[in-house]
C-alpha cells in the first residue's frame, strides 16, 4: 500500500528532473530546505530524522540534489522527504513537503479493532513494517 | 480544531499573499541557459551563424563593460577575452558533437590588493553564466574565517555549507593562502583544502572556484599544495596600476560621486600618489578610493568653515589643492584627522 503523505504523493514518482524543478521553485521563493528520513510510515509520525542541517541561502538546486543523492545512497529503503520552510512569516511554516524516496515494497497497515464497553469500538492502525526494530525495517 | 483557535482564517492558496520578498522566477526558466539543454546535435554539413551565436551569449557586452568599468589591466582583459572565445568556440563545437568534456574553469587571481580581483571575478561569473557554464552566475566571496571551523568536526560542515551556497555560481576565496598554515600541523585549514580539492574535481559542472591573493604568497601556497595547482587551469596575474591609471581611476570615482579635481588639485594628487606608493599598505585603487573619501571630508569642513556666505554648485563639486595636500602623506600635521 502506497503511503500518501505530503504533496505530489498521488502522482507517479517524480523523476530527478522534476524534483530539481521543484527545488528550483523553492529556492526562487527564498525558502530554506531540509531533508528528512524515517522508516516509520505511520501517518502520525510527523517528526522525522534530519539528514544534515537545513540548507539556507542556496542559489542552485545542485547542492540539494547532491545531498539528496547522498541520503538516498545511505538510506535506499527509507522514506525520504524534502521540506521547504518559509521564514517570512516569522514562525516555522512548511511551504512545501513531499516524499522523494520510498521503500521498494510497502506492506501497508493493519487495522485493529478493540471492543470496549457498550459496543464502542476503538481503532488503531499499525504498520506491518513497524514490527521490526528501527533500522531493520524494509530489508527486502 | 486546534488550528482554528489560534485566530485568523487559514490560507489554503498555493502562494499566500506576502507584503515583501523576492519575486520568484518560474522554475522552467531556471535551466534554460544550461549547456546540457542544448538543441539536438547538428549534422556534418550544418553551419553556425557566428554573429548570432556571439550576440546570443552576450559575451561582447560583458567584455565591453569590463573594459569600460576597469581602467588598465590590459593583460587581464586580453586573457579573459581569450577564455571567453575558447568557451564560445567550445560551445559551438559541442553542438556538432565535438569534444564533450567540460573545460576546467577554476582560476587563480594573483596581484596586489586593490587591483580589481573581486570586480573581475564578478564579471567572470556573469560571463560564464551567459556562456551557459554556470546556471546562476552569482559570486560568493569568502575568506578563511568562513570556511575553517574552530574545533574538531566543525570545519567540514562549515566548508560544505559555503560550497552549497556557491553552487551554480563562483566561489571566490580571497587570500586563499591563509587556508594553509604550515607552522601548525593540526590546523583545520588542511581539511578545508581537502574538501575543496574534492569538490573542484567532482562538481566541476556546478561550481567554479577562484582563489585570489598576493602573488608571492599564492606561489608558496601552490607549491605546498600541488593538488590545488594542478586543478586550476587559469592563472591570471593582476599588474599594479601605473600612476596615470590611478589618476584615471580617481577621476572615474569622483565623476560617479559628482565631484571633480581642479587643476592644482590634480597636480597635488599626482604628487600624493607618488608619495603614497612608497608608504606601507599601499592598496592601489582601494587607496585611491580612501584618499578621495578623506579629501571629501576635508572639502566638507573647508566649506562649512569658510567665510563665504553663498555656495555655488561648482563650489560643492570642486575638490581643491588644499583638500589633497592636507593629507598626512605630505608630512604635515593634519587638522582634519586624516
Image: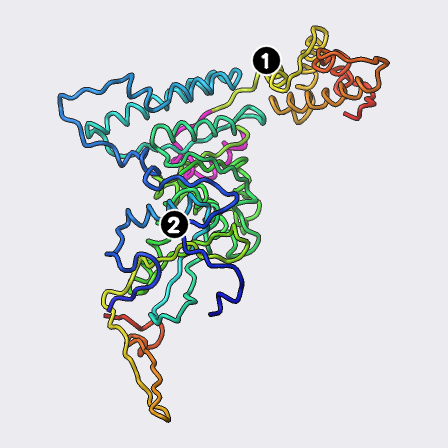
The numbered mark 2 sits on a residue in which chain?
A
Vertical placement of residue B219 versus B331, above or below = below
User: Does the stretch in magenta take in B53?
Assistant: no
Horizontal side, residue B301 vs residue A123: left or right: right
Mark 1, residues whose alpha carbon is within 10 Å: few (<14), some, or many (≥20)?
some
Q: Residue at x 36, y 59 (%)?
A: A81
Q: Which residue is situated farthest in the right direction here? A: B307
Residue B105 placement: quadrant: top left
The quarter of the image holding the C terminus of chain B is top right
Q: Pick whichever, B50 or B280, lies toward us.
A: B50
Horizontal side, residue B121 vs residue A80: left or right: right
Magenta region's main secondary structure? helix
Q: Which residue is situated farthest in the bottom direction here? A: A117
In the rendering, which numbered label is found on residue A3? none
State the image coordinates of residue B206 (x, y, percent, origin top left). 37, 40
Give SS at disc 2: helix
Q: Residue at x 25, y 25 (%)?
A: B92
Vertical placement of residue B244 versus A138, above or below = above
User: Does the stretch in magenta take in B218?
Assistant: yes
The numbered mark 1 sits on a residue in which chain?
B
Q: Which residues are magenta?
A: B216-236
In the rendering, which numbered label is found on residue A64? 2
Q: Which residue is mark 1?
A: B248
Mark 2, residues whose alpha carbon is within 10 Å: few (<14), some, or many (≥20)?
many
Amino acid at each position: 500500500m502506497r503511503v500518501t503523505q505530503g504533496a505530489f504523493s498521488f502522482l507517479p514518482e517524480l523523476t530527478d528532473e522534476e524534483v530539481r524543478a521543484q527545488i528550483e521553485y523553492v529556492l526562487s521563493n527564498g525558502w530554506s530546505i531540509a531533508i528528512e528520513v524515517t522508516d516509520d510510515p505511520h501517518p502520525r509520525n510527523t517528526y522525522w530524522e534530519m539528514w544534515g542541517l537545513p540548507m539556507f541561502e542556496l542559489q542552485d538546486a545542485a547542492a540539494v540534489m547532491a545531498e539528496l543523492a547522498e541520503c538516498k545512497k545511505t538510506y535506499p529503503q527509507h522514506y525520504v522527504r524534502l521540506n521547504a520552510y518559509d521564514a517570512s512569516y516569522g514562525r516555522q511554516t512548511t511551504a512545501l513537503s513531499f516524499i522523494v524516496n520510498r521503500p521498494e515494497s510497502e506492506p501497508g497497515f493493519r487495522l485493529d479493532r478493540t471492543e470496549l464497553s457498550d459496543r464502542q469500538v476503538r481503532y488503531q492502525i499499525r504498520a506491518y513494517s513497524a514490527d521490526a526494530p528501527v533500522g531493520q525495517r524494509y530489508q527486502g | 480544531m486546534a488550528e482554528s483557535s489560534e485566530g485568523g482564517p487559514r490560507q489554503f492558496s498555493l502562494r499566500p499573499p506576502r507584503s515583501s520578498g523576492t519575486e520568484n522566477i518560474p522554475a522552467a526558466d531556471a535551466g534554460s541557459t544550461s549547456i546540457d539543454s542544448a538543441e539536438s546535435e547538428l549534422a556534418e554539413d550544418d553551419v553556425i551563424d557566428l554573429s548570432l551565436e556571439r550576440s546570443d551569449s552576450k559575451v561582447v557586452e560583458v567584455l565591453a563593460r569590463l573594459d569600460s568599468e576597469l581602467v588598465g589591466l590590459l593583460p587581464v582583459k586580453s586573457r579573459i577575452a581569450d577564455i571567453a572565445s575558447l568557451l564560445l568556440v567550445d560551445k559551438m563545437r559541442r553542438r556538432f558533437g565535438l569534444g564533450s568534456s567540460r573545460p576546467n574553469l577554476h582560476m587563480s587571481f594573483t596581484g596586489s590588493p586593490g587591483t580589481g580581483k573581486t570586480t573581475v571575478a564578478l564579471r567572470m561569473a556573469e560571463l560564464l553564466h551567459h556562456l551557459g557554464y554556470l546556471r546562476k552566475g552569482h559570486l560568493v566571496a569568502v575568506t578563511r574565517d568562513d570556511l575553517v571551523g574552530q574545533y574538531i568536526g566543525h570545519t567540514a560542515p562549515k566548508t560544505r555549507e559555503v560550497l552549497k551556497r556557491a553552487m551554480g555560481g563562483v566561489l571566490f576565496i580571497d587570500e586563499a593562502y591563509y587556508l594553509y598554515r604550515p607552522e601548525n600541523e593540526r590546523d583545520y585549514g588542511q581539511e578545508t583544502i581537502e574538501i575543496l580539492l574534492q569538490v573542484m574535481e567532482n562538481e566541476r559542472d556546478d561550481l567554479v572556484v577562484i582563489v585570489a591573493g598576493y602573488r608571492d604568497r599564492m606561489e608558496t601556497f601552490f607549491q605546498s599544495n600541488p593538488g590545488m595547482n594542478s586543478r586550476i587551469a587559469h592563472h591570471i596575474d593582476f599588474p599594479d596600476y601605473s600612476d596615470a591609471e590611478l589618476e584615471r581611476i580617481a577621476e572615474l570615482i569622483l565623476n560617479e560621486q559628482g565631484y571633480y579635481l581642479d587643476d592644482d588639485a590634480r597636480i597635488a594628487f599626482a604628487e600624493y600618489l607618488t608619495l603614497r606608493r612608497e608608504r606601507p599598505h599601499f592598496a592601489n585603487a582601494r587607496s585611491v578610493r580612501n584618499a578621495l573619501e578623506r579629501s571629501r571630508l576635508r572639502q566638507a569642513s573647508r566649506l562649512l568653515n569658510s567665510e563665504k556666505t553663498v555656495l555655488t554648485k561648482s563650489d560643492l563639486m570642486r575638490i581643491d589643492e588644499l583638500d589633497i595636500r592636507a593629507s598626512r602623506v605630505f608630512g604635515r600635521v593634519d587638522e582634519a584627522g586624516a
